[in-house]
């Protein structure tokens, strides 16, 4: 788990892919990740399209690239949750989010975690097969 978090944090930004209501792919950058209750956990605003899209179709891919010509793809099913303690940890990890959301009790601040899935690590030197996979 920590290897995945470290990779995404080192990348700075990573990209979350979803499917919109017309079946079209949508990708956007994220930069927050944490472990919560043993799961890869992210945060968003329940007013955003990403929230609506993942509620309609809970499967998401995440992709990030690092300076060593390696990349990661995380694929699986996500689930949203609201938890004040998790939100407090979000603010500890990324204090600027408290400026946006003001309180851990803010109802538009929601977390989501992978409930099932896999992280696959790739390197350009190894072709199109992952050199390592981790079940999540």
Image (spheres, grey):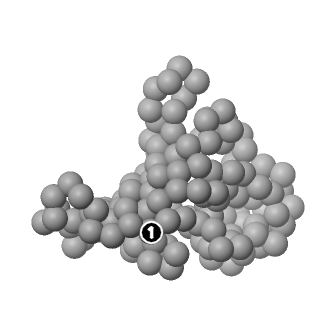
From the viewer's perspective, tell me whether residue 46 is left or right of residue 136: right
Query: In the rendered image, which residue does mark 1 sit on?
Result: 134
From the viewer's perspective, tell me whether residue 56 is left or right of residue 73: right
Say how many tags the image has: 1
Task: Out of 5 and 100, give the one closest to the viewer.
Answer: 5
Label 1 crowd (10 A; few <14 / some 14-19 / many >=20): few
Residue furthest to the right in view is 105
Q: Residue at x 15, y 58 (%)?
A: 127
Task: Out of 50 and 72, give the one closest to the viewer.
Answer: 72
Q: Residue at x 84, y 66 (%)?
A: 84
Q: Is residue 90 visible?
A: yes
Q: Is residue 24 above or below residue 133?
A: above
Q: Tell me where residue 124 appears, x and y as whole percent.
A: 17, 62
Q: Is residue 131 above or below residue 29?
A: below
Q: Residue at x 63, y 68 (%)?
A: 39
Q: Is residue 96 visible?
A: no
Task: Out of 110 and 101, give the one closest to the viewer.
Answer: 110
Q: Residue at x 68, y 78 (%)?
A: 92
Residue furthest to the top in view is 22
From the viewer's perspective, tell me whether residue 81 is left or right of residue 64: right
Task: Out of 103 and 84, give the one closest to the viewer.
Answer: 84
Please identify the quadrant where the C terminus is shown: bottom right
The image quadrant of residue 116 is bottom right
State the SS at label 1.
Answer: strand
Q: Tell me where residue 97 appears, x and y as whole percent.
A: 66, 64
Q: Tell me where residue 134 appears, x and y as whole percent.
A: 44, 68
From the viewer's perspective, tell me whether residue 53 is left or right of residue 73: right
Q: Tell me where residue 3 appears, x and y as whole percent.
A: 44, 78
């Amino acid at each position: 788990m920590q290897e995945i978090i470290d990779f995404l944090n080192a990348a700075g930004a990573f990209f979350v892919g979803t499917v919109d209501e017309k079946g079209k792919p949508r990708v956007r950058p994220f930069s927050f990740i944490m472990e919560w209750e043993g799961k890869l956990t992210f945060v968003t605003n329940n007013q955003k399209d990403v929230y609506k899209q993942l509620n309609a179709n809970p499967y998401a891919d995440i992709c990030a690239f690092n300076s060593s010509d390696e990349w990661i793809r995380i694929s699986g099913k996500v689930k949203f949750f609201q938890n004040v303690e998790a939100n407090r940890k979000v603010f500890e990890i990324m204090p600027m989010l408290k400026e946006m959301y003001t309180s851990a009790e803010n109802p538009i601040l929601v977390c989501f975690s992978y409930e099932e899935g896999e992280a696959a690590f790739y390197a350009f030197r190894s072709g199109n097969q992952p050199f390592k996979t981790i079940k999540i």
